[in-house]
Amino acid sequence: MGYVAIKGGGRAIEGSHAAVEALRTAEGEAGTPLSLSTIEHQLRLLTSRVVSEGGLYHPRLAALAIKQMQGDTLEAAFALRAYRSTKPRLLEMPVQDTANMRLVRRISSAFKDIPGGQMLGPTYDYALRLMRMDLADESPQAFRSVAKRFRQAQPEADLPNSFPKVLDALRSDGLLPPLTQHAVEAFDITREPLVFPVPRSAALATMARAETGSLLAIAYSNMRGYGDVHPTIAELRVGYLPVMLPHPVTGELIEAGEVLMTECEVVAMYEGSDNDGPPVFTLGYGACFGHNEVKAIAMAILDRALQKGMRDGPSNPSEDPEFVLLHVDGVDSMGFASHYKMPHYVTFQSDMDRLRTTQEKATSSEAISSEPTGTQGVRA
Amino acid sequence: MSPDYELPTNEAAYSFGFLDEYAKREVRRCILKAISIPGYQTPYASREMPMGRGFGTGGLQVTLSLIGSNDTLKVIDQGADDSVNAVSLRHFVELTCPGIDTTERTEEATLIQSRHRIPETPLTEAQVLVLQVPYPDPLVLVEPSEVRRKVMHGEGDYSRLLTKLYEDLVHFDEITIAHRYPTRINGHYVIDPSPIPRYDVPLLHQSKALVLLGAGREKKIYAVPPYTNAEPLVFDDVPFRTEDFDDASGKRRACARCGATDSFLDEIIQQGDAPTRWQCSDSDYCNQQLAQRQAMTKVNA
């Protein structure tokens, strides 16, 4: 009987959800359910990616999303974003000073020595990507002692609470344009649609929650030659930023908590300045929730490229605000790619109608025109 | 504290109606603007919904912003109430809007959310039709940049779209646009009427019901207000043609289930050598026709 593909849709969906759940628990007797704390800590970079792409700093909910979506970053970030969209906006944040970050790691590739010193911190950058077979069969005892031993081996902390920014040094040397205080309101991408041209703050906000891979791909096109940013990382820092919010009663700024974030500032080759001042380096800025250095670097490069595109007009895809900003959101792009799996019977019926009509016309006109040319061996 | 206690559930609970009231109000303001400027693509913030962008999140935000507890909702996809995505969207609205009624009968609904079809049963002034839109801009066929498209709309410059139609005629002797047929609203803006078949486009013209079109991913809402002209883009000497359901002998095919010869048909391929089956795409219309026919047979018997 007809309608097989359509009828019973409700039951099919229920069955599909049960099958997904069965796969999640397929380990059976031997399995242990993942705890949210385990995901948050042992899969910290995955959690970082999800809080950043989800646009909501809630590592525990991000861990839940990762568990629920069985490790799919796009789906997990999507769940977090959809959750976030149910929350009203409470206030506009005052500008936060990242110089106050409690650092985990900071490096500069511009200078050998920077005020406060380089701090390599946790990174895979210089790790050999060899499989560590000892992790394959790790005992809980050994696992539990590692972090403890690491902490015991650390010298009593005489680290300062914050480090100066490398850019400040460049600025005081006149290599960067002086900071101008802009009193413009930041563009809130969660409350306003992007209608081009958009201000830089809209571009930065869009990229801060963009999908890492999409951002990287477009930034990479710029680095390889479809663009001209030759960046030097003035400073890349990872750490906990104290979030200062006005007290609801007194209005005084108080520390409401802290967020783990990654920030990258790239310096690019100078350009002749528009006004009569001396030429200076140009800047690109990248920042995102969580620990995700590739994303922050890609964003900084694109910020620089987009600033150029906004000023001179784009000469590459990576300099075109519309091209970059409308194609880097993971929730949008994965949703649209997935939607092609839905029924398209009606539109396809309509497509077939057009094709058949066109084919008929082509056949009938061929029949007429083929009589005189039939003997010449013309191939279609 | 229990060792299993990891997340306070009240912290993660969802609010009534899913969207917060500010978001709904914003959508309603955009709807008013869209109705005031027929066919104009009104930008709006477009919240993330808990289903994929492309699955009807634009239509859903319109529906959720309008629906009240005295509304009766019908959700269809490909004309059918029981299509997987229609089931999923209806379930979501039922879950988040307790108190509303849902129906499969077109004439009982006050609010109809649809993807790819307009119901066969004529709509009334008391009804609102919400269409889900993947591509809100018909000019995307000829111009990828939104900035440039906006200027073209403002200037009423649809010359490149007309050129595309003309080139189709030169290449294929037919206009090849199958669905999403560019349609001029109220003599000015040309809209993408969503991927409805050409068969449904005439239903937009002077429609008694308000038609709202919501594109979630592209963040646009536009409208065809009641009793407004909606004219498919054509040339004076090339008439607009809807899908053709005639068989080889030129006879209009009938629905294999209900026998209707005045509905949009789905072509259903059969196993082996069995001939292709044709059946109404609008499942409610098909059921009603079938019930009528059965009642007639009973009376006659």
Image (cartoon, coloured by chain):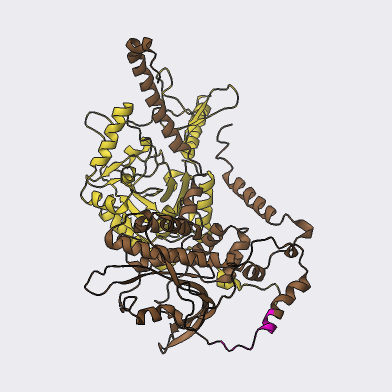
Chain colours: A brown, B yellow
Residue B155 or residue A122, whichever sits in front: A122
Image: magenta residue range:
A150-159
Predominant SS of the magenta segment: loop
Q: Residue furthest front?
A: A112
Magenta residue check for B150: no
Residue at 38% x, 52% y is: B214
- Picture coordinates of residue A156 (x, y %)? 63, 89
Looking at the image, residue A29 sits to the left or right of residue B243; the answer is right
Residue at 43% x, 46% y is: B114
Residue A114 or residue B13, whichever sits in front: A114
- Picture coordinates of residue B48 (x, y %)? 46, 60
- Picture coordinates of residue A223 (x, y %)? 43, 58
Residue B216 or residue A48, whichever sits in front: A48
Dividing the picture into quarters, in which one does residue A75 lie? Answer: bottom right
Q: Quadrant of the N terminus of chain A?
A: top right
Residue at 29% x, 41% y is: B183
Dividing the picture into quarters, in which one does residue B238 lie? Answer: top left
Position of residue A272 relative to residue B66, above or below, is below
- Total marks drawn? 0
Q: Quadrant of the C terminus of chain A?
A: top left
Q: Is residue B251 visible?
A: yes
- Picture coordinates of residue A167 (x, y %)? 40, 78
Residue A148 or residue B17, whichever sits in front: A148
Magenta residue check for A154: yes
Q: Is residue B71 visible?
A: no
